[in-house]
Amino acid sequence: MILQGKTILIANISGKRSTGWGIAQSLSKQGARIAYTYQNERFGTEVRSLFSPLDSIDVGECDVTSDDDIKKLFDRLGSEVDALDGLIHTPAFAKQEDLTGNFVDTSRDGFKLALDISCYSLIALCKGALPLLGVNGGAVTALTYIGGERAVKNYNVMGVAKAALESSVRYLAADLGPKKIRVNAISAGPMRTLAARGLKDFMVMYELTKEKAPLRCNIDPTDVGNTAVYLCSEWAKGVTGEIVHVDSGYHMIGI
Ligand SMILES: NC(=O)c1ccc[n+]([C@@H]2O[C@H](COP(=O)([O-])OP(=O)(O)OC[C@H]3O[C@@H](n4cnc5c(N)ncnc54)[C@H](O)[C@@H]3O)[C@@H](O)[C@H]2O)c1
């Protein structure tokens, strides 16, 4: 088990269909102890029951738009552990009206909100985690989508947020490298999570990806989880500032 003895924080998990839960299962199978958070109590009951059979720490609620919540999260975690070996970042959000129609109609408020939750939160969580991650060094892994590299219909402001997130991965990797903290992202293909199914025409995109991708299949959260295992492990000790595509090869196909 390549993650035996490691403690990894997943911020955050929404439920059994989430990518975060797929990652938690893969990390746990490789021996990691998982510290987990959820946005608010609406998710808490389901998430706690998922984790009850696993070696895990419930770090409680954290709304990433609140500096106070982030501080409290790391205060609580710091009272349970002396060091952290990894951080998985999952939050993403944009207003429904900004995920459909014309990108040019994106509102200032919608732009700020999407960038705050989906990108700035990575920077804020890294800063909060630094005292614990800096003890032995560690791995930070964020989740992104090809809509950060290409203009994908309806993805709109979320694509801009993912581009900023991917750039932040590189700046954080440069900043935190001397502390032996590696920062990477996984660019996942479409998965049928609750959040994704709220995207307009998601199933059209899902079926098209399967048809066009070299491997002729979609991925699932466990595929992302298995790549997260690698990125969190010693096997990736020379890898930082990287965006790893886990999308059945879809990202490199031209038509
Ligand atoms: N599902 C896909 O097709 C897909 C593909 C590529 C990348 N991703 C990325 O994977 C990550 C997880 O997404 P998912 O599809 O598993 O859906 P999800 O709904 O499980 O994850 C989104 C998370 O964002 C959290 N969140 C939103 N606002 C927040 C706030 N203010 N404070 C704290 N947390 C907040 C939600 O609680 C939820 O846990 C996201 O970054 C998403 O962009 C998903």
Image (tube, rainbow, N blue to C red):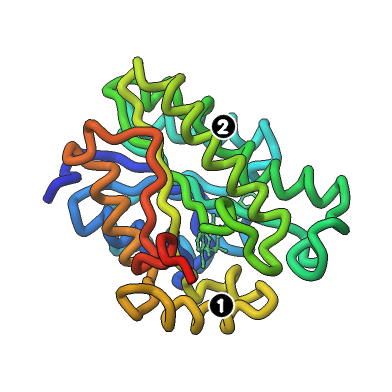
Please state the horizontal and vertical placement of residue 40, each as a whole percent of the image.
Answer: 63, 55
Q: Amino acid at mark 1?
A: Met
Q: Residue furthest top?
A: 178
Q: Nearer the viewer, mark 1 or mark 2?
A: 1
Q: Amino acid at mark 2?
A: Ile
Q: Is residue 107 visible?
A: yes
Q: Give the residue displayed 41% in from the left and 51% down from the top.
A: 186
- In the displayed structure, 161 sits above or below 146; it is above
**Which label belongs to residue 123?**
2
Neighbour tally class for label 2: few under 14, some 14-19, many 20 plus, Cα within 10 Å: some
In the picture, measured across the screen, residue 176 lies left or right of residue 154, that is left
Q: Quadrant of residue 218?
A: bottom left
Counting from the top left corner in percent of width and height, residue 91 is at 57, 51
Quickly name the residue at label 1: 205
Residue in front for this viewpoint, 54 or 236: 236
Point 23% across, 31% down: residue: 238
Q: Quadrant of ligand 1?
A: bottom right
Circle 2 — which element?
A: helix
